[in-house]
Amino acid sequence: MSTIDSVLTETRVFEPRADFVAQANISGMAGYRALCDEAERDFTGFWARLARENLQWSRPFTRVLDETNPPFYKWFDDGELNVSYNCLDVHLANGNADKTAIIFESDDGSTTRVSYRELLARVCRFANGIKALGYKTGDRAIIYLPMSIEAVVAMQACARLGITHSVVFGGFSAKSLQERIVDVGASLVITADEQMRGGKRIPLKPAVEEAFAMGGCEAVRKVIVYRRTGGDVAWNDGRDVWMHDVERGQPELCEPVQVNAEHPLFVLYTSGSTGKPKGVQHSSAGYLLWALLTVKWTFDLKPDDIYWCTADVGWITGHTYITYGPLAAGATQVVFEGVPTYPDAGRFWELIQKHKVNLFYTAPTAIRSLVKAAEASPPHHPRNYDLSSLRVLGTVGEPINPEAWIWYYNQVGGGRCPVVDTWWQTETGGHMITPLPGVTGLKPGSCTLPLPGIMAAIVDEAGGDVELGKGGFLVIKRPWPSMIRTIWGDPERFKKSYYPEDLGGRYYLAGDGANRDADGYFWIMGRIDDVLNVSGHRLGTMEVESALVAHPLVAEAAVVGRPDDLTGEAVVAFVVLKRARPEGEEGARIARELRDWVAKEIGPIAKPKDIRFGDNLPKTRSGKIMRRLLRVVAKGEEITQDVSTLENPAILEQLGKSL
Ligand code: WT7
């Protein structure tokens, strides 16, 4: 709460500089308003114009928005195109064949560059190779790869053939991988032997073996393996094949498969308020349109810019702002394999200096940890690097506290670069509410104003607009091209989660609480559901609870979030064992075991920071766990709320004690 309070009392406004405004892709408030007005006046005409001007269609659309079966909206749905063609081939035709597409910086600091021509050739060879293995449009591929040119190649090759990909973040466990293979019905898995992070080798292929051993993966015919480290891996002769062998001898031309605008480009799993992650299904044309436009608008991308987004392709940020948006825009981008602290805490600054990065996009959690690192280790403070190439800075993933914002603005951006605090979600496909660098006066901690065509609003429980200054639910009142189309295999859950009846079934409910100030600026207050945000990553409390109760020792578990200076929120678990409550050394040992268990079940990001054991959990007489009280206990604060409805108030004191 303290962060939110300080955010709301923040009053500084940083206006864009005149010279920036003059050269900006969207120039000044007048430029922004003109686009917003166009969208207000002629909503479908606005989107149709952008889709015609920015994408190459093999078959032009005649219908713009189909709203006959809400909330299953369709965009440009009688049009056809190919996403990979729009990301690669178009630049060869534009005379940009030899422009660098990717500057790959590996964990150990070596650099590989590929031009658009070379990237297209690799994508085509790999696409031809998977086609030769019998894969075709409509199949699903799981991609479980480290940050690499190969990851981009794999995604683009799928897009070229109309194979729907589902990328699983390399930090997710074998169990999470297996669940996704099963849920999406994958027939192909693309992985690597190992990944390199911070000088360490982390196995990937063994997790695939483990996932297979859990069963349910029988539909997978081939596992393609990118040789990253050359580490020893188990090999299944009939099933496994090296990526370089798949590509070998294949022609550098692969006819792109033209797909319907609504064809599912990818499914990406994200946490919700139940134990089971949701497969967010995205389209081809609408998704790509918004990925491309937001790169140009939000980052003010210019032809000679060097762009760098530090996200992993395992998250939506990596999909939209590495694999698709920047390539569709013909940008030159840095793709980074490593971590911000290896070989030292100056790695990001060193890379910006080395590659003369102009547009830099990262997460508040990374900024906060680098603030700390710079204080602890002055030689790695950004002031010791030449960061004068920077022009625009971006953040994403969670609210940024004004202190971190100011540090980013001054210490990294030299007080010269606008900071775009981009609010969006896996489900929205691209930026929704964000400053535009040549338009918006910046207020640290606010994501400011919706992009043109995005009808964002704040409403109450009944869907009515709230007055400025009053908090409420963040909704989007009209569909937009890059929106989630459905939850893979579960349209009912899609409807219930995002278009609830209480709001009339017509507004997209984001799941965030928000506020608007007197200038109409949006301030995100955090999730309104049982979703946590740990280091910008979404985690369902139920997901962690189900992982915990799957452990043979655990009888019951309740998980809540606690504000954390570094990670935004931290996972705190209250656990009742099937045996007596452990204390001291034994308690510490079991807590360690449970932490490792959660890492194995979900992934290391889900590890509880704090585990408290109790004889019971605080429950009402009807047996409902009082999470509200647990959140207070987790923070170590005094309980001032009414506990008279509790069956067992004494339990709170026991749970208040850390091990
Ligand atoms: C949730 C979405 C969007 C890609 C990364 C996360 C939070 C995201 C901001 C921001 C405040 C933010 C919201 C949102 N969030 N960006 N700029 N300010 N909160 O995607 O995993 O789908 O998570 O992240 O709570 O609902 P995601």
Image: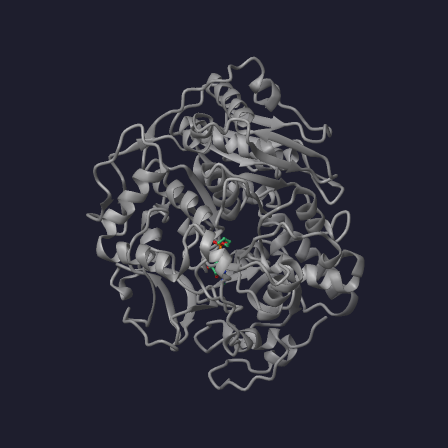
The coloring applied to the image is one colour
118, above or below 565, in the image: above
**The N terminus appears in which quarter of the rendering?**
bottom right
Q: Nearer the viewer, residue 309 or 211?
A: 309
| Side of 192 where 372 appears, left or right | right
Q: Is residue 352 left or right of residue 94?
A: right
Considering depth in this image, is 73 or 217 the residue closer to the camera?
73
Measured as percent of width and height from the top left, residue 508 is found at 33, 58
Q: Residue 50: image x %, image y %?
A: 32, 44
Residue at the spot x=51%, y=19% of the render?
A: 129
Which residue is found at the position 54% from the left and 41% from the top?
A: 168
Asked whether 589 or 607 is in front, the reply is: 607
Q: Residue at x 60, y 49 (%)?
A: 601
Q: Residue at x 37, y 37 (%)?
A: 284
- Residue 51 occupies quadrant: top left
- Residue 541 in percent (x, y) is at 52, 61
The image shows residue 429, relative to residue 6, as above or below, that is above
Residue 648 makes an appearance in the image? yes
On the picture, is 357 further left or further right than 546? right
Which residue is more in the foreground, 301 or 42?
A: 301
The residue at the far top in this view is 249
> Measured along the vertical axis of the image, is residue 86 above or below residue 604?
above
Give the residue furthest to the left. 68
